[in-house]
Image (cartoon, rainbow, N blue to C red):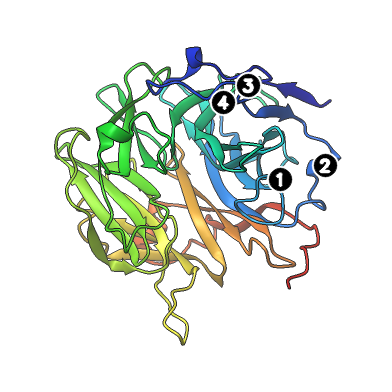
Amino acid sequence: MRRIVGCLVVCAAIVTCGGTIASAVEPAQIIVNPGAEFADDVRTWQGIPGVERALSGRLWVVWYTGGAFEGDVTNYALLATSGDDGKSWSPPRVAIQGKPGTRIGDPLPWLDPSGRLWLFYRQLTLDSTTNKAKWSGTCAIRTDEPDAAEPKWSEPFVVGEGGILFGKPIVRDGAWIAPFFLQGKGSPWGKQAQGRETSVITSMDEGRTWSWLGGTTVKPELLNFSEATLAARRDGSLWMVIRTKEGLHESESTDGGKTWSATKPMPQFVGPATRAHVRRLASGAFLLIYHGGERTSKGVFLRNRLTAWLSVNDGRTWPHRVMLDDRNRVSYPDATQAPDGRIYAAYDFGRYTPEQKQILLCIFREADVRNGKLDETAARAQILVNQATGASAPTK
């Protein structure tokens, strides 16, 4: 049965970034068991997934779709689940959809230290008169029962205005710290940031309220969507990997995220302008998932050869790697690690390409990266989570 959660007007009382939200901007609808209008054969494109694993082992994958392309004002997010370690997947259990004139995108799941599942997402609402942004920011919903196939979800709430939380938070000494791309002029944190758009925000009360902590900046000629991902080093410093137009750059903080070094290139990861994923594994090694750096004949980097690298010195060198998917049009990895050490990496394949439009999952171990190949008996590659089959609009 279809059920809708979250129809209240977002008001200043629940804005958690220290500012106020434009009046009468409504939150997204959280539609449980969405109907035929969200079916696979209706959707003409899809991508940008995220993955999490509940303590029981239940898997959750979220992505966004809707409309004809990314950035369409009719975009919405979908969430599917698997109770058998990815062998089979539900149809979308939840749709996050805005009211007319509102776009939902960039969804990201995260399992917090208490085992609660968060879904962060970007909301952009246009002014019906000017067709310009009326409000934009990161919102979230949460369930306290992610082990259930059909859990109850909170109503949407605001995390931060005027930016995108698009990398999993990390926890340091009780503080939650998350990368946050300040985009445009709509954030109450803009004056505090003073142009440091590639930033981090923090929560000291388990996500109830968030504040701007610190940040750095990418040179204007290299600035793309400044999607970043975080990891904590053994010496207590924080390390940030950032998307730029020439591949991946890095920055570090030695004071808990308040100040960050100037960004600099990561020579081994010159490649396409797209998101990477970084995390510290249970062993202490760093995992980075990105592309293999292959160019076209015109020198353009391709989103192909999706590869997992391993560093044993906190991200300074990357001697180990394994290919996860060598095809073209694979991108936007996100990953999580189970208590038994297995790594679950979600990514998209052929967002707009007929016969593709797939959300995929790869399950592997750190040993596979060290050995340079996926274990044929234990690893599982190219697991289909969902495929959109709607006919794309003809190109002009």
| Numbered marks: total | 4
Distance from label 3 to label 1 (Cα)? 23 Å
Q: Is residue 357 left or right of residue 285?
A: right
Q: Secondary structure at mark 3?
A: loop
Can residue 283 be spotted in the picture? no
**Image marks 3 and 4: residues in contact by CB distance under 8 Å:** yes
**Of pointers 4 and 2, the one earlier in the residue sequence:** 2
Q: In this view of the protein, which residue sits in the foreground, 82 or 238?
A: 238
> Residue at position x 38%, y 69% from top?
271
- Identity, as a three-letter code, of the amino acid under mark 1: Ser
Q: In this view of the protein, which residue sits in the foreground, 349 or 382?
A: 349
Quadrant of the rendered image containing residue 168: top left
Q: Which residue is mark 1?
A: 88
Tag shown at residue 153: 3
Distance from label 1 to label 2 (Cα)? 22 Å
Distance from label 2 to label 3 (Cα)? 21 Å
**Of pointers 3 and 4, the one earlier in the residue sequence:** 4
Residue 131 sits above or below residue 351 on the image: above
